[in-house]
Amino acid sequence: MVVAETIAGLSAVKTAFDMAKALQGMHDAAARDRAVIELQKEILVAQAAQSALLESESALKKEVAELKAWDADKQRYQLRDIGRGITAYALKEGMQNGEPEHNLCATCYQRHHKSILQPETRAPGMTKTLVCHDCGSALYLSGTPHPDHFKNRG
């Protein structure tokens, strides 16, 4: 997309330049006025292409910044067995930075998203569960899941 916008912008600038050169030799006022209008159109096309490029650049810079921030934050976690063969990402020793102990959803972590698992007690069955409210994962730490637990799950 960026390459196409760049080519379109350069093409519009070249066309505008060629038209401006042609204006120098025109002596007919009506032809010159038509050429000026066409030149203005080409300038607008070039400006639109430049604007699109600037928007793309800004979006790419934002994405790079988010990826760098995620890469730095994800280094604070490691995959651990939190019981019953269930895995989640937990803070590494000494990486708390003032945060309380918590676990991240492994599914969301793999999608480059930080989602803290929330403890819940579910009835019937009184299961102790860690739930991801972003992707809907439910990790049963104790008890047996009941079919009602899966109703209304997003």
Image (cartoon, helix red, strand yellow):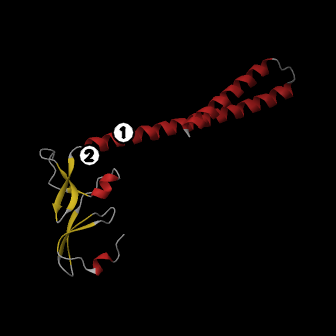
Circle 1 sits on which residue?
65
In this rendering, the answer to whether 143 lies above or below 25 is below
Q: Position of residue 151 (x, y in %)?
A: 33, 78
Residue 87 placement, left or right of 8: left
Circle 2 sits on which residue?
74
Q: Position of residue 69 (x, y in %)?
A: 31, 41
Q: Amino acid type of disc 2?
A: Lys
Write the residue at 71% across / 31% down. Answer: 40
Residue extending farthest to the right is 28
Residue extending farthest to the front is 85
CA gap, disc 1 and disc 2:
14 Å
In this rendering, the answer to whether 144 lies above or below 58 is below
Q: Foreground residue, 131 or 40?
A: 131
Q: Foreground residue, 47 or 124?
A: 124
In this rendering, the answer to whether 125 lies above or below 139 is below
Q: What secondary structure is found at the residue carrying circle 2?
A: helix
Q: Position of residue 41 (x, y in %)?
A: 71, 34
Residue extending farthest to the left is 94
Q: Quadrant of the C terminus?
A: bottom left
Q: Quadrant of residue 136?
A: bottom left
Residue 4 placement, left or right of 89: right
Q: Which mark is residue 53?
A: none
User: CB of mark 1 within 8 Å of CB of mark 2?
Assistant: no
Residue 134 placement, left or right of 83: right
Which of the marked residues, 1 or 2, is nearer the chain's N terminus?
1
Write the residue at 29% across / 80% down. Answer: 147
Q: Amino acid type of disc 1?
A: Ala
Write the residue at 59% across / 33% down. Answer: 6
Dot 1: within a 10 Å radius of its alpha carbon, few (fewer than 14), some, or many (20 or more) residues?
few
Write the residue at 64% across / 34% down. Answer: 8
